[in-house]
Amino acid sequence: MSMDILELIEKHYPLKPLHWKHKNEVLETDAGTKRVRIWTDERTMTWHFNWREQLESNTLLTDRMIRTLDANWFLPFEDHFLTLHDERYEPFPKHSHEQTWGMLLGKLLSQGIEQPIYENEHFSETREQMVQQYGVDRSDLNIPILNRSLPEAKRRIRTVETIRNRYRHLKIPSLEPSILTHQGKRVHGRLFWQGGNEPPERSMYGLCDFLSDWRLATDTKSMYKLLDAIHDHFPLEGGYDQLLAADLIAPREVQRCVRRLDSTDDHSVSEILDQFEREWESNRTLVEEVCRWIEHRAKKVIR
Amino acid sequence: MKAASMSVDGIILYYYDLFPEKIESYGRVQRITTKRGTFALKETTMNKEQMDWFLHCMDRLNELGYDHVVPLTLTKYGDPYVIAKNRYFYVTRWYESDSRSSFPYEDFIIDELGKLHANTVKAQSFTVDVIKDSFNGLSTRFEQRQLEMERFTELAERQTYISPFELRYLSQFHKMMRIAEEAKQKVSEWYKGCEENERYRSALCHGRPFRGHVVQDGLGEGSFINFERAILDTPVRDLAYFFRTAAQYPEWSEQRAIEWLGRYESHLPLLPEEKVLLASYLKFPEPVFSTIQLYQGSSDISQLELVRKLDRKLNVMKSLDRFADQFLYTIPN
């Protein structure tokens, strides 16, 4: 398979592949290091093409799809599709660059609202569906630490439901399910954003993950600056701040824990539970801090 | 032009995946040597509207199958240009351009202008107002320049000690004024001709067709570069620019100019009124006017050099005047 891809790239792209750096994923070429992405779903691929094209500006670069010799942005490949992207490694700094990162996230959110992919633009899950989705109904696992957490997790789901009902009129952005700080690289002094290839989700979970990641890498003050900067490009006040808080409150650490327990043997159960406790605590702090930022901004507005 | 080494904003090269081994500067053009070939990076002064028009012209030439133009190299994302520091940059393959080489530049340019204009010429729907605007614009320009030349004459004559440049200029002043009057008269004739025949043609003009905008590939085949000043206008616009610049090279003679015009007309015969308009452009002592501006604005150039320049321009003016008279003679009454 890998040989075929290299041949295909050499035939169709204006560059010469040299060798794989990571087989079937990253290759060295005479035009620099490139990443190959294989897409099974054309709709997902088009969604990823559109946001990359629209986000790119003089100050913000994205790993857009490199054009073939025929000026196409993808190649048909064994019933699937292949796209080629730049791959960069130098991380973009976080401290003192909150404005740039905030602009990126603000634009991702704005475009996430504009870009249609799902017919339903709003949250439609019922509480029962959420309970099932987050694994809060899994008392069958019989793990005391987890079981003790489930009533609290259920309360959190009720809060999520209440907030979502209150802001039912707001369109929910389509974002990649995972957005992390390591995806931001530095290219000629600019932020170069390397996206993924997962189907988008209509939720703000991606932003929650990013904030959690950011806070761990920096500090609370920096996270507040980042939230201010996001707000400059995508107004969070008026409901999106509450929806962000709701997505932070949703018991995803329970969901992750249940998934890990379902797919592991007994040896690592204690590790999984340790991790669950750490995530629970970390998320609790993050929720508190984000809520403090929301309250602070609300007071500013009232004044 | 002498090359100077320099650096280029890396973000521009990023869009083309160019890793330069050497960068040389030729004014607004950087020659970038890489393992993947040699490229020309052009910094333009075009605004968005001009850039859109330029790209439209390049697309149009492509549609017409006109292949004597160096195509733009697209960025890796398929874009025709890059914006950096509020300027538009574009890239082409690098081709050699040496205006002193033995390449028959004028033969190439006149042939290609003929083909380009013949492929794009279009009879415009005739409206008196449009022609009148052109006539008024050209007449006013000629008159303003004539007035400034007269002013310069008056100032020179008032000097106690006349400079060599002024002396040379004054000795030719009356001849220049006579030629300028003829040029103005030809503009009026052109206007009447258009009005009588109720016709006016435009073609896609390169804008600045001269040796500096022609390059050769490895096989010695010529191509135009720089369609940044391309415009839809009377084909005479390109022809006037061509003959005015060609007259400054040693290969010029009135006989060769007549041959070049014949070569052009083998592709696109000119209408009588177009020939009259061409004559008016060529007769008007525009090159002398620009030398006066240079004299008034520059303290760096020596008197000797300025007099030499003026002499060259006066010779060009007289030669273009004779050339115009020759082809005007061929217009049937």
Image (cartoon, rainbow, N blue to C red):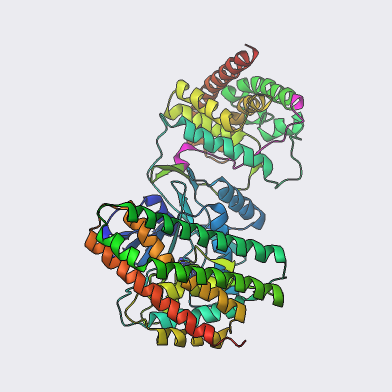
As for residue B312 lying within the magenta part, the answer is no
Q: What secondary structure do most residues of the magenta stretch adopt?
A: loop
Please name the residue shown 32% across and 71% down the image.
B312
> Which of B115 and A148 lies nearest the eye of the viewer?
B115
Give the quarter of the figure containing the C terminus of chain B: bottom right
Q: Residue at x 72, y 35 (%)?
A: A171
Tell me: A115 left or right of A73. Answer: right
Image coords of residue A223 (percent x, y): 49, 25
Q: Is residue A169 shown in magenta? A: yes
Relative image position of residue B256 (x, y in whole percent) = 41, 86
Q: Is residue A17 visible?
A: no
Of B167 and A301, which appears nearest the observer? B167
Give the residues in magenta: A165-183
Q: Nearer the viewer, residue A6 or B287?
A: B287
The tally of labels here is 0
Image position of A108 with respect to B139: above or below: above
**Vertical relation: B252 (above or below) A142:** below
Q: Is residue A51 left or right of residue B287?
A: right
Residue drawn 70% across the image and 21% down it? A159
**Closer to us: B181 or B139:** B181
- For the question of whether residue B187 can be seen, the reply is yes
Q: Is the N terminus of chain B in the top left, top right, bottom left or bottom right quadrant?
A: bottom left
Residue B299 in percent (x, y) is at 26, 52
Above/below status of A112 relative to B307: above
Question: Which residue does the image show at 60% across and 15% down from the upper left?
Answer: A300
